[in-house]
Image: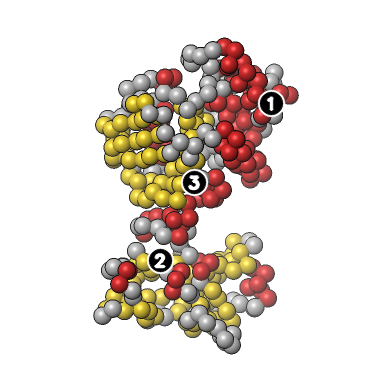
Protein backbone atom coordinates (compact mmCIF):
# COMPACT_ATOMS: atom_id res chain seq x y z
CA UNK A 1 0.00 0.00 0.00
CA UNK A 2 2.95 2.29 0.74
CA UNK A 3 6.11 1.42 -1.14
CA UNK A 4 9.31 3.38 -0.66
CA UNK A 5 12.19 2.32 -2.90
CA UNK A 6 15.68 3.77 -2.62
CA UNK A 7 14.44 7.09 -1.25
CA UNK A 8 17.15 9.73 -0.96
CA UNK A 9 16.65 13.21 0.44
CA UNK A 10 19.55 15.64 0.62
CA UNK A 11 19.38 18.60 2.97
CA UNK A 12 22.18 20.81 4.21
CA UNK A 13 23.71 18.76 7.04
CA UNK A 14 21.42 15.73 6.77
CA UNK A 15 20.39 13.11 4.24
CA UNK A 16 18.09 10.12 3.99
CA UNK A 17 20.30 7.46 2.48
CA UNK A 18 18.36 4.95 0.42
CA UNK A 19 15.23 4.16 2.44
CA UNK A 20 13.36 0.99 1.42
CA UNK A 21 10.05 0.28 3.11
CA UNK A 22 6.91 -1.66 2.23
CA UNK A 23 3.77 -1.13 4.32
CA UNK A 24 0.96 -3.57 3.50
CA UNK A 25 -2.72 -2.78 2.94
CA UNK A 26 -4.38 -2.22 6.31
CA UNK A 27 -1.11 -2.48 8.22
CA UNK A 28 -0.25 -0.30 11.23
CA UNK A 29 3.46 0.36 10.78
CA UNK A 30 5.66 2.34 13.17
CA UNK A 31 8.81 4.15 12.20
CA UNK A 32 10.98 4.39 15.31
CA UNK A 33 14.26 6.07 16.06
CA UNK A 34 15.97 8.65 18.23
CA UNK A 35 15.51 12.36 17.75
CA UNK A 36 16.99 13.66 14.49
CA UNK A 37 17.10 10.18 12.86
CA UNK A 38 15.04 11.37 9.88
CA UNK A 39 11.63 9.89 10.76
CA UNK A 40 9.61 13.02 9.98
CA UNK A 41 11.49 13.46 6.71
CA UNK A 42 10.38 9.99 5.60
CA UNK A 43 6.74 10.93 6.34
CA UNK A 44 7.11 14.31 4.64
CA UNK A 45 8.57 12.59 1.58
CA UNK A 46 5.57 10.26 1.40
CA UNK A 47 3.24 13.26 1.85
CA UNK A 48 5.08 15.21 -0.88
CA UNK A 49 6.14 18.07 1.38
CA UNK A 50 9.87 17.33 0.93
CA UNK A 51 11.12 16.49 -2.59
CA UNK A 52 13.01 13.24 -3.13
CA UNK A 53 16.49 13.52 -4.66
CA UNK A 54 16.21 9.90 -5.81
CA UNK A 55 13.91 6.92 -5.38
CA UNK A 56 10.26 6.11 -5.85
CA UNK A 57 7.18 6.42 -3.64
CA UNK A 58 4.06 4.38 -4.33
CA UNK A 59 0.72 4.88 -2.54
CA UNK A 60 -2.12 2.45 -3.26
CA UNK A 61 -0.46 1.14 -6.44
CA UNK A 62 0.10 4.67 -7.82
CA UNK A 63 3.55 6.13 -8.31
CA UNK A 64 3.14 9.46 -6.50
CA UNK A 65 6.81 10.53 -6.54
CA UNK A 66 6.18 13.55 -8.77
CA UNK A 67 2.67 14.43 -7.53
CA UNK A 68 1.79 17.42 -5.31
CA UNK A 69 0.66 16.62 -1.72
CA UNK A 70 -3.08 17.04 -2.40
CA UNK A 71 -3.02 14.42 -5.17
CA UNK A 72 -1.21 11.70 -3.22
CA UNK A 73 -4.17 10.32 -1.27
CA UNK A 74 -2.50 10.72 2.12
CA UNK A 75 -3.72 12.35 5.32
CA UNK A 76 -1.24 13.61 7.88
CA UNK A 77 -1.50 14.40 11.60
CA UNK A 78 1.32 16.27 13.31
CA UNK A 79 2.57 16.16 16.89
CA UNK A 80 1.42 19.74 17.56
CA UNK A 81 -1.79 19.14 15.50
CA UNK A 82 -0.99 22.20 13.29
CA UNK A 83 -4.57 23.50 13.63
CA UNK A 84 -5.45 27.00 12.38
CA UNK A 85 -5.88 29.14 15.51
CA UNK A 86 -8.21 31.65 13.81
CA UNK A 87 -10.69 28.94 12.70
CA UNK A 88 -13.16 27.07 14.91
CA UNK A 89 -13.27 23.26 15.16
CA UNK A 90 -15.76 22.81 12.31
CA UNK A 91 -13.82 25.03 9.92
CA UNK A 92 -10.54 23.35 10.80
CA UNK A 93 -12.02 19.98 9.87
CA UNK A 94 -13.51 21.32 6.63
CA UNK A 95 -10.19 22.92 5.71
CA UNK A 96 -8.95 19.43 4.89
CA UNK A 97 -11.38 19.40 1.94
CA UNK A 98 -10.24 22.69 0.42
CA UNK A 99 -7.69 21.21 -1.95
CA UNK A 100 -9.37 17.87 -2.53
CA UNK A 101 -11.67 17.08 -5.38
CA UNK A 102 -14.50 14.71 -4.63
CA UNK A 103 -18.24 14.57 -4.15
CA UNK A 104 -19.60 17.19 -1.75
CA UNK A 105 -22.31 14.82 -0.54
CA UNK A 106 -19.82 12.08 0.31
CA UNK A 107 -17.59 14.61 2.08
CA UNK A 108 -20.53 15.90 4.11
CA UNK A 109 -21.43 12.36 5.17
CA UNK A 110 -17.82 11.64 6.14
CA UNK A 111 -17.64 14.92 8.07
CA UNK A 112 -20.81 14.01 9.95
CA UNK A 113 -19.61 10.44 10.67
CA UNK A 114 -16.20 11.60 11.88
CA UNK A 115 -17.69 14.28 14.14
CA UNK A 116 -19.89 11.59 15.70
CA UNK A 117 -17.19 8.93 15.87
CA UNK A 118 -14.61 11.26 17.41
CA UNK A 119 -17.07 12.88 19.86
CA UNK A 120 -16.58 16.35 18.39
CA UNK A 121 -20.26 17.41 18.05
CA UNK A 122 -20.32 19.54 21.24
CA UNK A 123 -17.10 21.29 20.20
CA UNK A 124 -17.82 22.24 16.58
CA UNK A 125 -18.24 26.00 17.15
CA UNK A 126 -15.46 26.28 19.73
CA UNK A 127 -12.16 28.02 19.01
CA UNK A 128 -9.35 25.47 18.72
CA UNK A 129 -7.38 27.67 21.13
CA UNK A 130 -9.74 26.52 23.89
CA UNK A 131 -9.37 22.76 23.45
CA UNK A 132 -7.47 20.23 25.57
CA UNK A 133 -4.51 18.35 24.03
CA UNK A 134 -6.62 15.23 23.44
CA UNK A 135 -9.44 17.26 21.83
CA UNK A 136 -6.97 18.99 19.51
CA UNK A 137 -5.63 15.62 18.38
CA UNK A 138 -9.16 14.41 17.64
CA UNK A 139 -9.81 17.53 15.52
CA UNK A 140 -6.50 17.03 13.66
CA UNK A 141 -7.43 13.39 13.05
CA UNK A 142 -10.87 14.38 11.71
CA UNK A 143 -9.27 16.97 9.39
CA UNK A 144 -6.90 14.32 8.02
CA UNK A 145 -9.61 11.66 7.58
CA UNK A 146 -12.32 13.85 6.08
CA UNK A 147 -10.57 13.66 2.69
CA UNK A 148 -10.88 9.82 2.77
CA UNK A 149 -7.12 9.28 2.38
CA UNK A 150 -5.77 5.94 1.21
CA UNK A 151 -3.14 6.08 3.94
CA UNK A 152 -2.81 7.96 7.21
CA UNK A 153 0.56 9.40 8.25
CA UNK A 154 0.96 10.15 11.96
CA UNK A 155 3.93 12.21 13.12
CA UNK A 156 4.38 11.59 16.86
CA UNK A 157 0.70 12.36 17.54
CA UNK A 158 1.01 11.30 21.19
CA UNK A 159 4.26 13.03 22.13
CA UNK A 160 2.75 16.34 23.26
CA UNK A 161 -0.06 14.73 25.28
CA UNK A 162 0.01 14.10 29.00
CA UNK A 163 -0.21 10.39 29.97
CA UNK A 164 -3.98 10.43 30.51
CA UNK A 165 -4.79 11.80 27.02
CA UNK A 166 -2.05 9.66 25.47
CA UNK A 167 -3.83 6.48 26.48
CA UNK A 168 -7.16 7.87 25.25
CA UNK A 169 -5.73 8.75 21.82
CA UNK A 170 -3.80 5.43 21.59
CA UNK A 171 -7.08 3.55 22.13
CA UNK A 172 -8.79 5.77 19.58
CA UNK A 173 -6.14 5.07 16.92
CA UNK A 174 -6.33 1.33 17.63
CA UNK A 175 -10.13 1.13 17.35
CA UNK A 176 -10.25 3.42 14.27
CA UNK A 177 -7.61 1.30 12.59
CA UNK A 178 -9.49 -1.90 13.38
CA UNK A 179 -12.83 -0.49 12.23
CA UNK A 180 -11.65 1.13 9.00
CA UNK A 181 -8.74 -1.13 7.97
CA UNK A 182 -6.85 2.05 7.08
CA UNK A 183 -3.14 1.77 6.29
CA UNK A 184 -1.19 3.74 8.90
CA UNK A 185 2.46 4.83 8.97
CA UNK A 186 3.25 6.36 12.35
CA UNK A 187 6.43 8.00 13.59
CA UNK A 188 7.30 7.70 17.25
CA UNK A 189 10.33 7.43 19.46
CA UNK A 190 8.41 5.59 22.13
CA UNK A 191 8.54 1.79 21.90
CA UNK A 192 5.39 1.57 24.06
CA UNK A 193 3.40 3.03 21.14
CA UNK A 194 4.75 0.31 18.88
CA UNK A 195 3.92 -2.44 21.38
CA UNK A 196 0.41 -1.14 21.78
CA UNK A 197 -0.48 -0.40 18.15
CA UNK A 198 1.93 -1.61 15.49
CA UNK A 199 2.02 -4.77 13.39
CA UNK A 200 5.58 -4.09 12.26
CA UNK A 201 8.27 -1.51 12.87
CA UNK A 202 11.39 -0.10 11.25
CA UNK A 203 14.20 1.41 13.31
CA UNK A 204 15.84 4.44 11.75
CA UNK A 205 19.27 5.74 12.72
CA UNK A 206 20.99 8.73 11.14
CA UNK A 207 19.05 8.59 7.88
CA UNK A 208 19.24 4.80 7.42
CA UNK A 209 16.98 1.89 8.36
CA UNK A 210 18.82 -0.41 10.79
CA UNK A 211 16.14 -3.10 11.08
CA UNK A 212 12.60 -3.88 9.94
CA UNK A 213 10.44 -6.59 11.49
CA UNK A 214 7.57 -7.49 13.79
CA UNK A 215 7.46 -5.63 17.09
CA UNK A 216 8.27 -8.82 19.02
CA UNK A 217 11.08 -9.78 16.62
CA UNK A 218 12.86 -6.43 16.86
CA UNK A 219 12.27 -6.27 20.61
CA UNK A 220 13.64 -9.75 21.31
CA UNK A 221 16.19 -10.11 18.51
CA UNK A 222 17.73 -6.77 17.60
CA UNK A 223 20.06 -6.99 14.61
CA UNK A 224 22.59 -4.38 15.74
CA UNK A 225 23.98 -2.91 18.95
CA UNK A 226 22.19 0.35 18.13
CA UNK A 227 18.78 -1.36 17.89
CA UNK A 228 19.51 -3.42 21.02
CA UNK A 229 20.18 -0.26 22.98
CA UNK A 230 17.18 1.51 21.45
CA UNK A 231 14.77 -1.28 22.49
CA UNK A 232 16.09 -1.28 26.05
CA UNK A 233 18.50 -4.22 26.11
CA UNK A 234 20.38 -2.79 29.08
CA UNK A 235 22.98 -5.56 29.01
CA UNK A 236 25.25 -5.30 25.97
CA UNK A 237 28.29 -7.29 26.98
CA UNK A 238 31.36 -8.23 24.94
CA UNK A 239 31.61 -11.93 24.06
CA UNK A 240 34.81 -13.85 23.48
CA UNK A 241 34.70 -17.04 21.43
CA UNK A 242 37.27 -19.80 21.72
CA UNK A 243 37.23 -23.39 20.54
CA UNK A 244 33.47 -23.79 20.25
CA UNK A 245 32.75 -22.08 23.56
CA UNK A 246 31.93 -18.50 24.37
CA UNK A 247 32.48 -16.40 27.46
CA UNK A 248 30.80 -13.31 28.87
CA UNK A 249 33.52 -12.04 31.21
CA UNK A 250 34.50 -15.20 33.16
CA UNK A 251 31.17 -16.89 32.51
CA UNK A 252 31.71 -19.72 30.01
CA UNK A 253 28.75 -20.98 27.98
CA UNK A 254 28.31 -23.46 25.15
CA UNK A 255 28.16 -21.90 21.69
CA UNK A 256 25.90 -23.52 19.15
CA UNK A 257 26.96 -23.64 15.51
CA UNK A 258 23.90 -21.46 14.61
CA UNK A 259 25.41 -18.58 16.55
CA UNK A 260 28.08 -17.66 14.00
CA UNK A 261 30.82 -15.52 15.41
CA UNK A 262 29.14 -13.15 17.87
CA UNK A 263 30.83 -10.17 19.46
CA UNK A 264 28.05 -8.97 21.78
CA UNK A 265 25.58 -10.61 24.16
CA UNK A 266 22.35 -8.63 24.49
CA UNK A 267 20.18 -9.46 27.50
CA UNK A 268 17.01 -7.70 28.60
CA UNK A 269 17.22 -6.46 32.23
CA UNK A 270 14.03 -8.34 33.11
CA UNK A 271 15.73 -11.58 32.00
CA UNK A 272 18.49 -11.18 34.58
CA UNK A 273 16.91 -12.78 37.68
CA UNK A 274 18.32 -11.72 40.99
CA UNK A 275 18.05 -13.74 44.19
CA UNK A 276 19.55 -13.29 47.64
CA UNK A 277 23.03 -14.86 47.93
CA UNK A 278 22.00 -18.43 48.71
CA UNK A 279 20.54 -20.00 45.60
CA UNK A 280 17.11 -21.50 46.19
CA UNK A 281 17.28 -25.29 46.52
CA UNK A 282 16.37 -26.94 43.24
CA UNK A 283 17.26 -23.82 41.20
CA UNK A 284 17.52 -24.98 37.61
CA UNK A 285 18.91 -21.86 35.96
CA UNK A 286 22.70 -21.41 36.08
CA UNK A 287 23.67 -19.09 38.90
CA UNK A 288 26.39 -16.43 39.08
CA UNK A 289 27.64 -15.07 42.39
CA UNK A 290 27.79 -11.27 42.41
CA UNK A 291 27.66 -8.05 44.41
CA UNK A 292 25.28 -5.12 43.92
CA UNK A 293 27.50 -2.26 42.77
CA UNK A 294 24.84 0.44 42.29
CA UNK A 295 21.08 0.98 42.59
CA UNK A 296 19.16 3.59 40.57
CA UNK A 297 15.64 4.16 41.85
CA UNK A 298 12.95 4.58 39.18
CA UNK A 299 10.02 4.90 41.58
CA UNK A 300 8.02 1.66 41.39
CA UNK A 301 11.05 -0.13 39.95
CA UNK A 302 14.73 0.00 40.76
CA UNK A 303 17.57 -0.66 38.34
CA UNK A 304 20.28 -2.73 39.99
CA UNK A 305 23.83 -3.08 38.70
CA UNK A 306 25.52 -6.28 39.75
CA UNK A 307 29.22 -7.09 39.41
CA UNK A 308 29.51 -10.79 38.56
CA UNK A 309 31.86 -12.93 36.44
CA UNK A 310 34.11 -9.92 35.86
CA UNK A 311 31.39 -7.79 34.17
CA UNK A 312 28.44 -5.67 35.30
CA UNK A 313 24.90 -6.95 34.69
CA UNK A 314 21.83 -4.72 34.88
CA UNK A 315 18.50 -5.95 36.20
CA UNK A 316 15.22 -4.41 37.33
CA UNK A 317 13.16 -5.25 40.35
CA UNK A 318 10.05 -3.93 42.08
CA UNK A 319 11.25 -1.45 44.70
CA UNK A 320 8.94 -3.07 47.27
CA UNK A 321 10.58 -6.47 46.66
CA UNK A 322 14.06 -4.96 46.86
CA UNK A 323 13.20 -3.41 50.23
CA UNK A 324 11.61 -6.65 51.47
CA UNK A 325 14.81 -8.56 50.60
CA UNK A 326 16.86 -5.78 52.23
CA UNK A 327 19.03 -5.45 49.13
CA UNK A 328 21.44 -2.53 49.07
CA UNK A 329 24.73 -1.51 47.52
CA UNK A 330 27.33 -4.12 48.51
CA UNK A 331 24.78 -6.94 49.10
CA UNK A 332 25.92 -10.39 47.94
CA UNK A 333 23.45 -11.81 45.41
CA UNK A 334 23.03 -14.63 42.94
CA UNK A 335 22.12 -14.01 39.30
CA UNK A 336 20.23 -16.48 37.15
CA UNK A 337 20.12 -15.99 33.40
CA UNK A 338 18.57 -18.54 31.08
CA UNK A 339 20.96 -18.97 28.11
CA UNK A 340 17.85 -18.92 25.87
CA UNK A 341 17.38 -15.27 26.87
CA UNK A 342 20.85 -14.29 25.65
CA UNK A 343 20.66 -12.78 22.18
CA UNK A 344 23.97 -12.83 20.32
CA UNK A 345 24.92 -10.07 17.88
N1 LIG B 1 13.48 21.38 5.95
C1 LIG B 1 14.67 21.05 6.48
N2 LIG B 1 15.81 21.68 6.11
C2 LIG B 1 17.01 21.33 6.63
N3 LIG B 1 17.19 20.36 7.55
C3 LIG B 1 16.08 19.71 7.97
C4 LIG B 1 14.76 20.01 7.47
N4 LIG B 1 13.89 19.17 8.06
C5 LIG B 1 14.60 18.40 8.90
N5 LIG B 1 15.92 18.71 8.85
C6 LIG B 1 17.01 18.06 9.59
O1 LIG B 1 17.01 16.69 9.24
C7 LIG B 1 17.31 15.88 10.40
C8 LIG B 1 16.21 14.85 10.59
O2 LIG B 1 15.02 15.55 10.96
P1 LIG B 1 13.65 14.81 11.30
O3 LIG B 1 12.69 15.87 11.72
O4 LIG B 1 13.24 13.94 10.17
O5 LIG B 1 14.08 13.91 12.54
P2 LIG B 1 13.15 13.00 13.46
O6 LIG B 1 13.73 11.63 13.46
O7 LIG B 1 11.73 13.12 13.04
O8 LIG B 1 13.40 13.67 14.86
P3 LIG B 1 12.37 14.01 16.07
O9 LIG B 1 12.08 12.70 16.74
O10 LIG B 1 13.18 14.91 16.96
O11 LIG B 1 11.17 14.68 15.48
C9 LIG B 1 17.47 16.82 11.56
O12 LIG B 1 18.85 17.06 11.76
C10 LIG B 1 16.78 18.09 11.09
O13 LIG B 1 17.35 19.24 11.68
Q: Residue furthest right?
A: 122
The percent position of residue 132, horizontal first and vertical second, equals 67, 32
Mark 3 and mark 1: Cα distance apart in space: 27 Å
Q: Which quarter of the rendering shows the N terminus?
A: top left
Pick the front one: 171 or 150:
150
- Residue 167 sits in which quadrant? top right
Q: How many marks?
A: 3
Along the viewing direction, whichever of 238 and 257 lies nearer the viewer: 257
Q: Quadrant of the C terminus?
A: bottom left
- The alpha-carbon separation of the residues under discs 3 and 2 comes to 22 Å
Residue 295, horizontal then vertical, whole percent: 55, 70
- Residue identifier under label 3: 199
Q: Residue at x 45, y 60 (%)?
A: 220
Pointer 3 local density, CA inside 10 Å: few below 14, some 14–19, many at least 20: some
Residue that label 1 marks: 116
Is the CB of the residue bearing disc 2 within 8 angstroms of ligand 1? no
For the point 63% across and 61% down, the residue is: 299
The residues bearing labels 2 and 1 have C-alpha atoms spaced at a distance of 48 Å
Disc 1 packing (10 Å; few <14; some 14–19; many ≥20): few
Tell me the residue that label 2 is attached to.
343
Q: Can you see residue 87?
A: no
Q: Is residue 39 left or right of residue 298?
A: left
Which is nearer the eye, 191 or 2? 2
Q: Residue at x 52, y 82 (%)?
A: 284
Q: In this view of the protein, can residue 72 be seen by the observer?
A: yes
Amino acid sequence: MIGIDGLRVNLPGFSLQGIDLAVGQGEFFCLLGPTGAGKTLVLESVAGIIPAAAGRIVVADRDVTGLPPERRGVGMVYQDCALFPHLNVSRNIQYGLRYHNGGRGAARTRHHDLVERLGLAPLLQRSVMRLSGGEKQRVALARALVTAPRVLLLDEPLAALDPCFREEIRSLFCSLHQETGLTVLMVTHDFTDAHRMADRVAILNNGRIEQTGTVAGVFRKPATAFVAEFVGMKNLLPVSVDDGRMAIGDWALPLSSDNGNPHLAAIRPEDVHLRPADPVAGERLPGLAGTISAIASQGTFAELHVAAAGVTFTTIMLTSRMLALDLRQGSAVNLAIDPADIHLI
